[in-house]
Amino acid sequence: MLMSSPGLSDSDLPEASESQPPARIELMDQSVVYGEITDIHDGELYVTTAWMGDVTIALSSILQLQSDQNIELLTTEQEKLALSSLMVVNGEVVLDDADNLALDQLDVANPEEWEQGHGYRITGRATSAIEYNRGNTETDKLNLDAETIFESRRDRITLRADYEDSSALVTETDEDGAPVQDDDGNDVKTSQPTADNWRVEGKYDYFLSDPRNYLGVNLGFRSNEFADIDQRSYASAYYGRKILTRDTLTFDAEVGISYVDTDFTDPQEDDAYTGININLTGEARLFDSKVTLYFRQANIVNLASAEKSIYRTNLGLRFPLFLGLEAAAEASADYDGGAAEGKDKLDESLKFRIGYTW
């Protein structure tokens, strides 16, 4: 990046070379930034610079801008402009065949079809983690996880599901506790399940006039045989905000009210309550988007008894492989304060996944 200070004029800077960045941006404080415009989104200009990497500049802080890049602009009124170059003078986009356009009327640069209000952008992934151990410990584990997101300019639909099943080979014993053996003198082993649970969830978000803010509803179901949960259902309504919306850094926060209804294997333990749900979701693309750090925190705070609240945390790293395949390492902690009497309330795991993204 080349940046001039208020005390320097452009003539004081090194002469332009063939590698001179295509855009010159002068800010309100008279400093100048040189780089390549990569995006305009949510009132901010994204620029790639030679010295400082990617930088973000608020549109409201731009005084003058000159760029020789071909660019398409989508305005807040959904008007599409195709320009061979971009010039901003005194905070207004200069147009040859129309009135100048205020910078705060710019919405998106080089918009995709869904950003123009046509259909949905569909993204998602399906992953699996499989473990097969034979030795001192003999276990089999299977975990499947899938998520798909449909997003348009007006709303967003998120569908998630996961399933876990595991078993262990256990040596049979007789009444005296001695191992049972077959005719060849080998211990007789049987497979006993150690985990059997599933979860499905659907979310619908409706974006408000400021699309960073949204209202949503959430409906989910889960079952966990070894926590004696026959079925748990929950529904919530919430307010959310996209706090960070960069291509390389996103973060959403949601807060609302939930109703949770749990049917246990023992009907006498059935429970229902109203709670506050707080959800945090974020992603950061690192090392030129070669690695993605992701985080998801889902909480339902029981208003009647805080110790019976539910907290679920996932933290992981995803690595692209080839042809849409990816690998991931994920740590998770699932605290269920409303588990049946005598059952563990905290499940922790570390998984290595292989999956496909779209």
Image (cartoon, grey):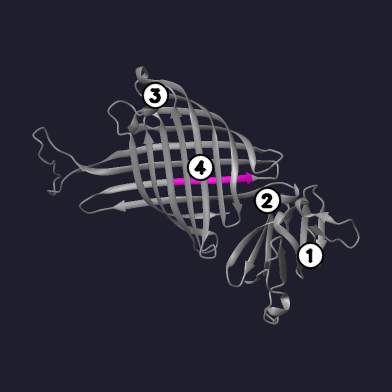
Helix, strand or loop at disc 2?
loop
> Dot 3 corresponds to which residue?
305
> Dot 1 corresponds to which residue?
86
> Dot 2 corresponds to which residue?
42
Mark 1 and mark 3: span between their CA atoms? Answer: 59 Å
The x and y percentages for residue 218 are 56, 33
Q: Amino acid at mark 1?
A: Leu
Most distant residue in the left direction: 176
Q: Are dots 4 and 1 in contact, CB under 8 Å? A: no
Q: Amino acid at mark 2?
A: Asp
The x and y percentages for residue 140 are 32, 47
Q: Residue at x 68, y 50 (%)?
A: 42
Mark 2 and mark 3: span between their CA atoms? Answer: 40 Å
Helix, strand or loop at disc 3?
loop
Relative height, residue 290 to residue 265 (above, below): below
One can see residue 338 in this view: no
Mark 2 and mark 1: span between their CA atoms? Answer: 18 Å
Residue 312 relative to residue 153: left or right: left
Q: Look at the image and give the residue range highlighted in magenta.
A: 144-150
Image quadrant containing the C terminus: bottom right
Residue 7 relative to residue 187: left or right: right
Judge by depth and name the residue closer to the eye, 266 or 210. Answer: 210
Query: Which of the 4 image quarters holds residue 205?
Result: top right
Query: Which of the 4 image quarters holds residue 109?
Result: bottom right
Question: Which of pointers 4 and 1 indicates the residue nearer the eye?
Answer: 1
Mark 4 and mark 1: span between their CA atoms? Answer: 37 Å
Give the mark, 4 or 2, whose residue is nearer the N terminus: 2
Helix, strand or loop at disc 1?
strand
Mark 4 and mark 2: span between their CA atoms? Answer: 20 Å
Is the magenta region chiefly helix, strand or loop? strand
> Dot 4 corresponds to which residue?
280
